[in-house]
Image: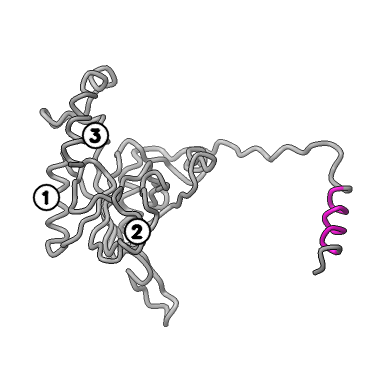
Amino acid sequence: MSSSSRDAILNAIRQNLPKQPVEHPQIPAFQQPAGPLRPAFERRLQEAGGAAHDVASPAEAEAKLAALHPEAKVVCSAVPEIAGTRRVATVHDPHELADVDVGVVRAQFGVAESGAVWLTQEDLIVDGLAFLSQHLIVLLDPEQIVADMNEAYRRVKLNETAYGCFMMGPSATADVEATLVHGAQGARSLNVFFLPRMSQYDFRSGRRLSGNTRLLREIDQDCIADTLRG
């Protein structure tokens, strides 16, 4: 198409736009399912080939990771709770992730109806970490689970990030002879660890902090995070 034809088409569209602005249709607030969301999330995640685990502390998370992947040599972490052998913040070229056995990230929230988790560029730091790692560990606050995609999209803020995706279980394909294969184009396994963020966790007692207590412990948590990064 020549530039003159393109301009003519675009000008015709501009000249025939509605005179009155048309508002976007409103999305209704759908009825939420009764009961806890976590069991539904775990069930859907398992159906997608993933698994969920309760971990009481960052130390227990480290131990669980070692038990799940005892032969892992390179553990690239984007979270303060698990140090790993490589910090993703030191990665400047995604090609450097080619040897990653286990990637560790934190999801902003999970979706009960699908077992998916929402990850952004700020969570991954290097987007390729979620796809080039052989195995993926996703930390998730169990209180950050929404019922369905309608509620999930209300929490997605694409204007605040350059990249984001919903990830549901490990990579999978069934194109050839309708045979399901995991790990065809991405992570071979995906495990979700239920663990609150460090700022919400008391490492001395192993209990979740209330809002006021959390503020009093911020300095302690910053020191712990610095130690893990170091």
In space, the residues marked 3 and 1 are separated at their CA atoms by 17 Å
Question: Would you say the residues marked 2 and 3 are in contact, meaning their CB atoms lie under 8 Å apart?
Answer: no
Horizontal side of residue 159 vs 229, given as left or right: right
The crowd level at tag 1 (other Cα within 10 Å; few <14, some 14-19, many 20+) is: some
Task: Please name the residue that numbered disc 3 is placed on.
Answer: 198
Most common SS among magenta residues: helix
Image spot of residue 119 (x, y percent): 40, 48
The crowd level at tag 3 (other Cα within 10 Å; few <14, some 14-19, many 20+) is: many
Look at the image and give the residue range highlighted in magenta. 5-14
Q: Is residue 6 magenta?
A: yes
Task: Please name the residue that numbered disc 2 is placed on.
Answer: 169
Q: Amino acid at mark 3?
A: Met
Sequence-earlier tag: 2 or 3: 2
Closer mark to the observer between disc 2 and disc 1: 1
Sequence-earlier tag: 3 or 1: 1
Sequence-earlier tag: 2 or 1: 1
- Residue placed most toward the observer, 123 or 144: 123
Looking at the image, which residue is at 40% across and 71% down? 173
- Residue placed most toward the observer, 5 or 118: 5
Residue 108, located in which quarter of the rendered image?
A: top left
Question: Would you say the residues marked 3 and 1 are in contact, meaning their CB atoms lie under 8 Å apart?
Answer: no
Q: Which mark is residue 63?
A: 1
Q: Amino acid at mark 1?
A: Ala
In space, the residues marked 2 and 3 are separated at their CA atoms by 24 Å
